[in-house]
Structure formats: C-alpha cells, structure tokens
Amino acid sequence: MSQRARITDYATCLAVFAAAFLSYLRTMRPTFGWLDTSELATGAWFLGIGHNPGYPTFMLLAHPFRWLPVGSAAFRMNLFSVACGAVAVLLAYLLAWRLCRNRPAAVAAALTLAFGRTLWDLTTEIEVYTLHACIMLGILLCLVGWRQQGGTHRLAGAGLLWGLGMGNHPLTLMLFPALVLLAAGERKGRLKRLGMVTGWAAVGLLVYAYVPIRAAADPPPAVNNPHTLSQFWQLLSAPGYRPQMFSLPWAVMLGRAGRFLFAPARELTRVGMAMGLVGAAALWRRDRLLLGTLAMVVALVAGYAAGYDIFDIYAYLLPTYLVWALLVAVGAAALSHRLGPLLERLAGQGASMLRGGGGAGLVAVALLCLPVWQWAGNLGPVDASQDYGAEDFARAAMQVAAPGALIVGDWYDIAPLGFAKYVLGVRRDLHLSAAFSAFASRTLQTAFDPDYLRRFPAVYAVEQQTDWSGHLRRRYLVVPEGPLLRVYVRGRPALARRMAPEAKPRWDFGGVAGLLRAEGTGRARAGRNIVLHLEWLRLGAIPRPLEAVLSLESAKGDLALTEKIPVAGGMMASEWRPGEAIAERLIVYLPSDLEPGRYCWRLLVRPRQGRALVERGTGAREIPLGWLRVTPRRDR
C-alpha cells in the first residue's frame, strides 16, 4: 500500500470516528439517569457488580473512566458509552470496508448506523449495549479477516472476544453458532480450529472470576454481591427474569418476530433496507456461508427478542442493525460499481464533469446523503443534553426525606437515589429498598410488614413503573411529600389546629368541609419542590375521612400533574371537631420536563373512594385555587 493510500485510510477512520464521537458527545446526558444506567454507573464507579448476570467485563472497562480529569462523576461514566459507540462505528466502517472495498459505501453504511435512532440513543447514557456492539463487531471483524486472509490468531481473537462479550451481555450467546459455523467452514483442520475457538472462548469466560472475588469487598450498590455459591448461581442464572422469557402467546411472538425482521426499514430508512437487500443478493453470489451466518445471527436475535417481554427490548435489536449496516455497505458498493459507469455513458459529450470517474463521485455524494438525512432526522429525538430529570428527582427526594429514613420503590427510582447516595455522597444516612421492582416479589411482603417498617424513624415510597403504593394506602396513612410518599406506619403528621367557629370558608364543599385559605408560591422552577399551605375547616358531618385531588393544569387545559392528599391528615370525625381549622403544609415536586408557562392549581374534595363533594352555591366539583408560573429548570 502506498503512503498516500495509507494516509487516506487513516484520515477516513479518524473522520468516521470523530463524526460519531462529536455527535454522541453533543447529545449525551450530562448527569445520571433512571433505572439500570444509574446502577451500572454506581457499580462501575466502585468497581462493583451489576444486576443479573453481574457484567464483569463492563465493570472492568468502564471503571477507568472514573479517573478522567474532566466533568462530573456522571459525565465521566456516560462518556464511556459515547466512546464505545464511536468505536463501534469505526469497527463497522472497517468491517464494511473489508466486505465491499468501496470507501464511500463503507463510510455511508457506518454513519447511517451511527445516526440511527437505537445506537445513537444508547450512547446518551452509560449502558452495556454500546460495548456489546463493539464486541460483536470485533468478533465479526476477526472472522471475516480470517476468511479473507487466514491466520489462526484471528480465530483465537474471535473466541476470546466472545468469552469477554458474555461477561458484558448474555446476548453475545447468539453469536456462538456463527463462530462455530465459520470456524468449521473447511474440513481440513476443522477440529483444531474448533478446539482453538472453544478454548479461547473459555479463557474469556474466566472474567466471571471477578464476581466472587470482588463481592468479598461488598462494593456499592451492594444489592447484587453474591457471598455464597448459591447466590453466585442465582446471579448468573437470573431466576427472576425467566418468567418474562418466551412468556407470550405464539401468535404474539410470531408477529413480534416479523416486525423485528423489518425493523431495519425504520432504523436505517427504507432506502437503507433496499440497499441491504441488494447487498444480500451480492453476498449470495460471493460468499454464501458468510451471508448464511449473518442471517442466522439476525434470526436468532429477532427470535429471542420476540419472546422476551421487557420494556427495553428495542435495545436487543441492535445486533440486527449492525448486520444490516454491513449489507448496506455491500449493496451500496454494488450499486456504485454499476451506476457510476452508467452515468458516465449517459452523460455524453454535454457533461464532461461526469467523465473520468465523475459518475462514481456523484454516486458517492448521493450515498453520503443517507447518513446526513439520518443525522438531521434523529438529532432532536435522541438529544438528552438537557435531561436532568433523574438528578432533580433524586435531589428533591433527598431534600424532604427525614434523617435515617427508608425509601421503598421500584428500580426505576431507587437506582438514581443510589447513585446520589454512594457516588455523590448525598444523604448517606438514607436506606434504599427496590422492593417494588417487578423481579423483587420475595422482598415485597417485607416492605408492607409493619414490624419491619417500624425499625426506621420514617418511611417513604416512590414508584414510576409499578403500582404497589396502593397496597400501602390501604394499610397506612400516605401523604405526598415532594416526589415521595410519606408512609405513616404509626401516628399522624403534626398539624396546627385552631378554633374558628365564626369563620366563613372561601370554598364550601357540600357543607361538610371548607377551605379557608390556599397559599403557595406564584413562581417556581421546574425540577424543584414547592410548598403549598392549605387551611381546612370542618363544617358538618363527615361520613369517612376526606381526600383532596390536587392537580396542575396548563393554560391550554392539559393536565401536568396530580396528587392525592388526605384532608386534614386523614382525620376521622371523632378527631376533628366542628368549627375547628386545621392547617396543612404540602410539598409538591415540579418535574424537570414541565414546560415553562402559566398553570392553574385545581382542587377536588371527596370522601375516600367516594364521589366528589360539590362546592356549595356553584355546583362545581373542581375549584381553581390560583395560578403558578413555571420557569425553566435553568437558563439554556
């Protein structure tokens, strides 16, 4: 290879990597996120252990990013996904170049993959999937290199990467049949090659020795650390996730599998899928074994994802898009090879710019329009650069929680609280329990046990994905406090009382109870807690405890948030005398994604599980309390 060609290759690789890296960095979340991302970031920060099956490879590779001298802790952890995503795009380009030997086609295919919705979205926060993309493409690059140039070291590298990939995500298992099939392609030396691949795969799997060794130190978040052989097996085998595997009816699974097979049309555009079909036809004529291997990977991934009933199943389709991007490169190269000379012949004497390779250049420019179209269309939907939702929630929750309190919730909410506690060092006195999680049924009963809850000076609940707080409401008095629900296992909140027999309420709810005053800030920032003061007056007979439904409605009439509040601390008629006024102080959390603007507080009063009490004299069921102007979380 000439010096000029070598420089061109290096420059192209650098350009592809830089285009992906800078775009991903531009849209990366600046702080920690919800669910697994915060848990994985906490584990990687302390060189810990993730949820099933532990992710040892991920922890070992992500941990060094903790020591980068730039940005916040969350920024550094998220930067790992950005780097892995950009490396995956570079590997996709190198692999596409090996398959098609056409630089514009390889660049177009790699960047079309880079700016597809799924891969780009997964790079905005720390996750295992971008590293999975790197490892998968590394395995395929080794296998294709071995088929083209030989060298058993490439087979050994593919086996080692497969073992390490299993330490990052179990979806790597879908590549093992492809690994075996390509290694056994020729009869001569087949057993030796299979033995080499299997042996190096076993060496890679030794990364799981990290789990029991590191568990002995019990690093944060300390919810997955196995200390016995039985616990280690449970971590690997994930018994809590098995009910979601192939639990759907066959008709539903077949329908999902069909949609997943055609998902590249949405991810890589219809033009990309058409070029992928052309590439599959070209590869059929050139290397049917390789095409069959790639098709098998796509079929296995789509079949497995079709039967796995989880909310983030879209990420499991990433290997399908990686394979299809390679076919796009082959198809684009085939079209370029045919269309370039055709354009030159059709141009005739009147278009000299298309002669002497100009037609091929025009085709190359047209190919590069596809990733530009992808970039422009997906930039807005994937942009997380202003997403502070999880951090604002965690800080608001820890602001209202009492010292030494227990917070019970689902994993969606508990994980960001854990990052704030362990990594940022905020409110280390709090106790966190993910008992509301979908896979935590064994610990769920404990969360409702009064003997267990009385061990803590205060108890709070929070959830966004499950619906277990209703059980707490039926057993205990539950009062909203910011983004949390305060659970009164014993006693009631301390409320100010005064006698006001001659007072006339501003709002009279059916002669049962009235509201003397409602005061709150007239201006507040999104992502903060605000305080409302309500003063209730008992007027007549109360058949059962009252509750108020407080809502925030935009000027357009859209409902922004709703809170159920027990009136006067849920007092019974025997505890609340006629003519007695009771003052309540309510803490309401305004989510970070609340649009700036003018909102109206509205209130509805009713007996628990009963119909709304009509405001006397007007017949209104829901009354306006006042206006609130919401300003952005921060100036942008």
Image (tube, rainbow, N blue to C red):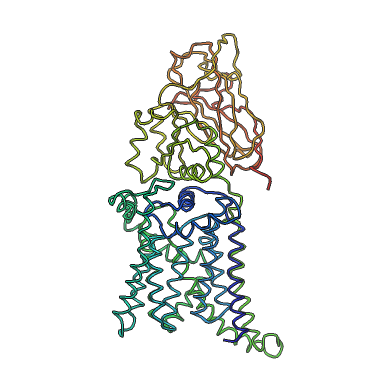
Q: Residue at x 36, y 72 (%)?
A: 178
Residue at the top extreme?
Answer: 502
Residue 185 in view in this figure: yes
Residue 255 in view in this figure: no
Give the side of residue 133 with respect to residue 595, left or right.
left
Residue 204: which quarter of the image? bottom left
- Residue toward you, 630 or 27: 27
- Residue toward you, 635 or 289: 635
- Whole-percent x and y of residue 591? 57, 40
- Residue toward you, 318 or 26: 26
Residue at the bottom extreme?
Answer: 349
Q: Does residue 173 lie above or below 565 as drawn?
A: below
Give the side of residue 423 with respect to residue 433, left or right.
right
- Whole-percent x and y of residue 560? 57, 39
| Total numbered labels placed on residues in the image | 0
Q: Does residue 322 lie above or below 75 as drawn?
A: below
Q: Residue at x 51, y 58 (%)?
A: 64
Residue 367: which quarter of the image? bottom right
- Whole-percent x and y of residue 542? 46, 16
